[in-house]
Amino acid sequence: MKYKLLAVSKFPNISGVNIGDYVQALASAQFLPHVDGFIDRDEELKDYDGEPCKVIMNGWYMHLPQNWPPSGLIDPLFVAFHLNSGVKKELLSAESISYLKKYQPIGCRDLNTMALLKNNGVEAYFSGCMTLTLGEKYHSAKKDGKTYIVDPIFNGHLGMKQILKAICIMLMHPFDILKLFTTKQLHLHNGRNFVKGAIKTALFYKEYLRVFGRELIMKSIYVNQESMYYKVHFKTDTERLAEAKRLVEMYAKAKLVITSRIHCALPCLGLETPVIYLERGNDIEESKCRLGGLSDLFNIVKINNGTLIPQFDVALPITPSNHPSNKDTWRSLANELKRRCKEFVSTTTISQ
């Protein structure tokens, strides 16, 4: 039997490659006896005409809904399935519902997807995300003391009052602001507007300093999980999977991770690495619909109009040694996902 992983290398993305998609693939790979290649999640599922294969169908569906449903040569396990609200009309068509019913119950990554499927007569349950299982292979008892800030966000208004405040901050903390501004992975500016970038960096520093200790802000390693860097430097799906593995192993040894990326925060839960999730308070619907049920698993700092609002009780500032412990509610989800994946690879029937 062939076993393949889902890839997302062909759909055009102006911001580059989201390595989080390959973190999801890495989670699935833990349970496969071998990996025999990749199938592009957006462009190849419907027209796949290779050898019959098993695929764990976790992830976001889909940017190109015309390429759905998948080929009968794919034996799927639907867990951690996210049906995005932007394409629900196409993916809830009569043809799609008929296809999904063949493989029900469908494990849904979020409560919104579960409700959409149930309302259309498909048996569905909340499975959580496959990345919660990454501790199966990548948990590390050894910690290296490093802290990471992964894709921090700042969505404050840049009015005259904020600009004047930023100038004062730059005058008071010039070396800190300069260091942060030149940290490419911080990505608070696009490199074309120096002044706007400096202002946003100063306001970011001031607001984050209100919640997080200065040492944490200045000494953490900044990481960007969606970038042209991954497209330029990692040309193949195999290379991107290896880079995802490097990042996961890095997070596994971390002392603390702060992130706005669910495919950093969820893996950290599974790896048992302390993690704080930065939640954008005014996010668009296509993004918010992903979080139902998942956000309950995290310790959250919400960001509303440039203001950080911790959703947990802990004395501020948060530091590498002063932070909330991870919740344990993810464990039952991870254990059930592991069980289903192991059961899936133990059978060899292709449904036509």
Image (tube, rainbow, N blue to C red):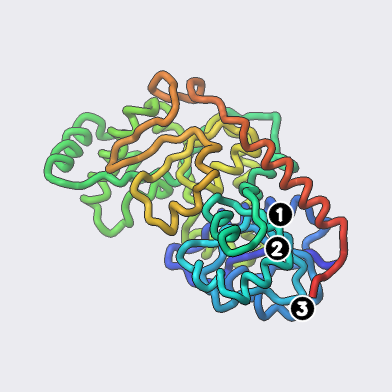
Q: Position of residue 29 (x, y in %)?
A: 73, 55
Report the residue marked by disc 2. Answer: 5
Instruction: Determine the secondary structure under disc 2.
Output: strand
Amino acid type assigned to the residue bearing label 1 in the image: Ser
- Using residue 352 as the reference point, say whether residue 86 is left or right of it: left
Q: Earlier in the sequence, mark 2 or mark 3?
A: 2
Q: Quadrant of residue 346?
A: bottom right
- On the image, the x and y values in percent for residue 8 come to 58, 66
Q: Is residue 86 visible?
A: yes
Tag 1 residue: 28
Q: CA distance from mark 3 to mark 1?
A: 20 Å
Q: Earlier in the sequence, mark 3 or mark 1?
A: 1
Residue drawn at x 56%, y 74% as measured from the top left: 93
Name the disc covering residue 50, or none: 3
Distance, label 2 to label 1, CA atoms, is 7 Å
Badge 2 vs badge 3, beta-carbon distance below 8 Å:
no
Q: Is residue 19 visible?
A: no
Instruction: Determine whether 156 is above or below 1 in the image.
Output: above
| Residue 239 percent location from the top left of the image | 65, 60
> Tag 3: residue type?
Gly
Pointer 3 local density, CA inside 10 Å: few below 14, some 14–19, many at least 20 = few
